[in-house]
Amino acid sequence: MVQYCCMQKNTQTMDKIISLCKQRGFIYPGSEIYGGLANSWDYGPLGVELKNNIKQRWWKRFVQDRDDMVGLDAALIMNPRVWAASGHLSNFSDPLVECKKCHMRFREDDDGIAAVASTLPRNDRSESVIASEAKPARSWPPFGRQSRNQKHCPQCGGELTQPKQFNLMFKTFIGPAEESADVVYLRPEIAQAMFVNFANVLRTTRKRLPFGIASQGKAFRNEITPGNFIFRTREFDLMEFEYFIDEKDWKKWFEYWQKEMKDWITKDLGLNPKKVHEVEVPKEDRAHYSKRTIDFEYEYPFGQKELYGLAYRADFDLKNHMKISGQDLQYTDTESGEKFVPHVIEPTFGADRSVLAAMVEAYHEEEVDGETRAVLKLPKWLAPIKVAILPLSKKDELAKAARPIYDELRQYFVCEYDETQSIGKRYRRQDEIGTPYCVTVDFESLDDKMVTVRERDSMKQERVGIKELHNYLVDKLV
Ligand code: GAP
């Protein structure tokens, strides 16, 4: 008998998800054999499949299936003048205060003071401590926040210095001489490459407005307070497009992309619409380039926080790049011959936050015959492994029947072959990693040429002919 217990998505749940991720190979603590590096995480064999599934589906939906979108994969390190034009050099910062007594540094935040997360090895600290040590708060937008000028250190009560602006861009050097002339930055957002290549793309694709340039890749921010597992890290994957429009149409396109984003979140990623909130960001909290911003927030176990953002960047970036580079980045209307700088709507999707929200939404615990089963009820397209082939025992004759099934199915789906441990334990393992279908080959299969297919969520089992198995699974999975 299956009894569904109402899971409380709280910090305990977060600990369980972090532990599952580590035990099953989704996500490991970064540099673990050296004691780790706080808030850095490595995607393991299953995690990389899951994140790739998100990136590929996003790319298909928003780029390949549309006539008005093209892709770009740009260099991570750009000419530093890019960051002068974008405003990041002068403004991409958080207020930092230091305790005059213990010299701990903190980020001064809207609702108090947030402690700086340690970058030292984590050694004996528990996952929950690591997850909660840094108070997550937004570092972006950098403008408009009012300092509260807290006077005392939350650690020792010592007096705090006045806030200093701390630029969040990672600096490095081109070439062997570490001189200021050779300073470059790891990109803090992926958007700028799409602005910088606007004229190239326009010329080579001959697209007309409205059209978009899409990109995926890493961004780097020297966050003062990273934390909450992969929610806020110093390097993270973004999926984003700049959608170029005529200024007069901006409201229409903003609403259009708002609906598209919601659709992706609830229908593709499978998040519960009740846990997704569209929050209008007030002017004083918006990034300097934005004339309107909506944040999509999700109810994570650690609170309602940002998942994605949608911004109307107007002509801020193209205009500034024109000014600083001296290049003409205008668009010419083919009918009227009018020249103008296009405006931009920018939907941004954090890939790591997509992974986190999908895992949180999918994680369930159920009581089955007096035992608790943990199951990841991921949408089938998102599951890292689609089919597990499980010979009932390690006996040679079963392997001889099961291997060819595995060899055939893996041509179409990501499959796993597993013959160790009891079948019950193997089912539990596949449930925990979210595998939608398990195919069991038993001794009867040798005579009747049929296998047992078990479905993850209902745990229902069905006998299916080996010859029909491929079509059966295509119907269910594709
Ligand atoms: N080009 C606009 C831009 O980058 P943003 O609001 O700074 O906008 C966009 O960031 C998205 O990037 C956020 O909605 C979130 O999904 C993700 N993100 C931002 N900072 C992050 C961090 N430190 N760790 C993980 N994801 C982050």
Image: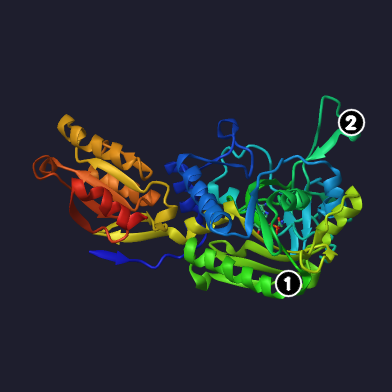
**Left or right of 291, for residue 236:** left
**Left or right of 164, for residue 409:** left
Q: Position of residue 38 (x, y in %)?
A: 64, 42
The answer to the question of whether label 1 and label 2 lie on touching residues, with beta carbons closer than 8 A, is no
Report how far apart the C-alphas of labels 1 and 2 lie in the structure: 44 Å
Residue at which label 1 appears: 250
Amino acid type at circle 1 is Trp
The image quadrant in which ligand 1 is located? bottom right
**Left or right of 83, for residue 475:** left
* Depth check, front residue: 431 or 293: 293
* Depth check, front residue: 478 or 183: 478
Compared to 211, does 119 lie above or below?
Answer: above
Compared to 176, does 10 lie above or below?
Answer: below
Find residue 41 and report its image quarter.
Answer: top right
Image quadrant holding the N terminus, namely bottom left
Query: Does the image show residue 394?
Result: no
Q: Residue at x 57, y 58 (%)?
A: 62
Residue at which label 2 appears: 179
- Element under disc 1: helix
Q: Residue at x 75, y 58 (%)?
A: 140
Query: Does the image show residue 245?
Result: yes
